[in-house]
Amino acid sequence: MILDQTIYASRDQACKEPYGAAAAGQPVRFSVYPDREHFLYAVTLWVGADGQPAQPYPMQWDGLCGARDRYTVVFTPEQPDLYWYYFTCDDADSRTFVSRGEAGVGICGQALGTMFQLTVFDGSYKVADWFGKGITYNIFPDRFCRTQVPPKEGYRAPRVVHENWNDIPVYLPNEKGEILNNDFFGGSIQGVISKLDYLESLHVQTIYFNPIFEAFSNHRYDTGNYKCIDPMMGTEEDFKTLCAEAKKRGMRVVLDGVFSHNGYDSLYFNARGHYDSVGAYQSQQSPYYSWYEFSHWPDQYGSWWGIYTLPQVNELNPSYLDYIVEDEDSVIRRWLSLGASGWRLDVADELPDEFIARLNAAARCEKSDALIVGEVWEDASNKISYSVRRRYFQGGELDSVMNYPLRDGVLSFLGGAPAQDFAEKMECLRENYPRAIFYNLMNIIGTHDTPRVLTVLGAKPEDWSGSREHRAAARLIGDDLIAARRRMYLAAAIQFTMPGSPTIYYGDEAGQQGFEDPFNRRTYPWGNEDGSLLDFYRRLCAVRAESTALNDGELRFLRAEGGVLVYERADADERMYVVINRDDAENVVRLPCLEAEDLLGGGVYACGDTDDLVLRAAGCTAMILRAIR
């Protein structure tokens, strides 16, 4: 028996209704369309929850569709979970399996291949969707803005303070072979307050901070005290003032929570003895001793990725849970009560689901619309971490994740991969994620963990393979900079027009460059911004902020081939078309409208004698067009 692949397509609502993820208790209708000539006597849906055997659901003949039979069955998933399904078709002699192929199209064969995914979520859980409807600005606190050169003394541990704001961060190891990351530039909360007008000019609605709590290092991912602002950053009162002033401008503040590990030099571990507390390193009678996993006290313990300065914690230890999550003055609740609106969870795939769920519940107890964002680098709907399938989106855990697949797709496309690869990557997420999550993603093209996007788009292979001394000093100039900037226009245009919150990594909009850490964490170039790039970002931010379709409109790819990417964002009031031509040569693009205005300054275009709008998209250009008629 030979069946063609058009028997089933998971993204076609004639085959599966509703599209994509479904709420628990919501009926899901499946239909397959074999040719009539096969005379099938049994067509069966097989579906099972993750880790469970698939159960058969016989499909019933449901009439004709042209030259095809239609077989239909309704399956109602009762519990939030990840479900896997496939189909079998039987005639008198053989059985054919229908498995998942590219773009969700059924692959017919005599053996079972990849199963289709059905994400089922708790429909009663309300995602904090305010996040996805606005622009986010990501601040690496030490490097965004300072109001004065901070003092060199007065800290628990020695700090190197850069008087010159434009210095290169220390990147070479010391005499012991360690890079201590204890050089600081003095970015502060008061510095951020002084730049709120600047952020408002970019239409920013969420300020996301990398860690601001007291720590030994400049990145502050080695938390020293979760309940204390780093003294170089400012005070608790400064934080409250920032939140209040941001709120006046319609902005919210999201903090970075590092809860899988903390600092070797911390109130809790206290290996260097800089705190008055009795830390776990100092005594097995320490109130914090049970937080850690010692194989030989005090010098052998679990640490994050084997880095001794980042001792791991047992997140489900009752004492730790109380301190971080459960107590009335827990870390989670405390900073929300002082003005924060949510948390981004560092290395979320290393936090147990139970911990995330309890953290979410505590946050919602403090603020009913508190946001919880997870750091996940892959498709988070089916993520397996430490041999455990994660339940991030089933309800009560995450409201959003960092959209690294978007970053990867954009940079791959601009690096030469075909546009269809990007479209398929996005369509996979759209199909697998609950809609509220997909429209709430943190859409990034750069972070403190990745090289600067301008550098990625312009650096030559020999720059990446050169010495760290070379990468520390390397800068794009001349034609290389012009070419990288043009590609960055395209990257930002895609980032700002996809569903989710476009997230600017501080300084990207001003043309900051840099390879890997710490070069990607250089200071914001106040007074030396790339004016052309900054002007483009201002226009892009205004377009995004003023468009209802870009905030919540449906997504439909119209063309994705080679170097040309065209998609539509539309709601009841507005239709927007995004045209990206990566090629150096001009490309002709057709849009299903009669007249449209290019909101990036290209003017108004009208159709001639055709029913479509025909555009000649110049090489390496982006257009965001609003349909007029």
Image: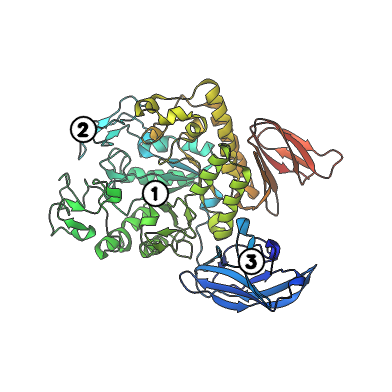
Taking the image as shown, residue 88 lies to the left or right of residue 441, namely right
Q: What label does residue 153 carry, if any?
A: 2
Cα distance between the residues tagged 3 and 1: 35 Å
Q: Residues within 10 Å of mark 1 (few under 14, many from 20)?
A: many
Return the residue at label 1.
Answer: 255
* Image label count: 3
Quadrant of the rendered image containing residue 184: top left
Of circles 2 and 3, the one toward us is 3
Q: Amino acid at mark 2?
A: Glu
**160 or 482: nearer the eye?**
482
Label located before the other in sequence (2 or 1): 2
Q: Is residue 46 left or right of residue 449?
A: right
Q: Quadrant of residue 364?
A: bottom left
Which residue shows up at 55% across the image and 72% down it? Answer: 47
Front-most of residues 508 and 100: 100
Instruction: Give the amino acid at mark 1.
Output: Leu
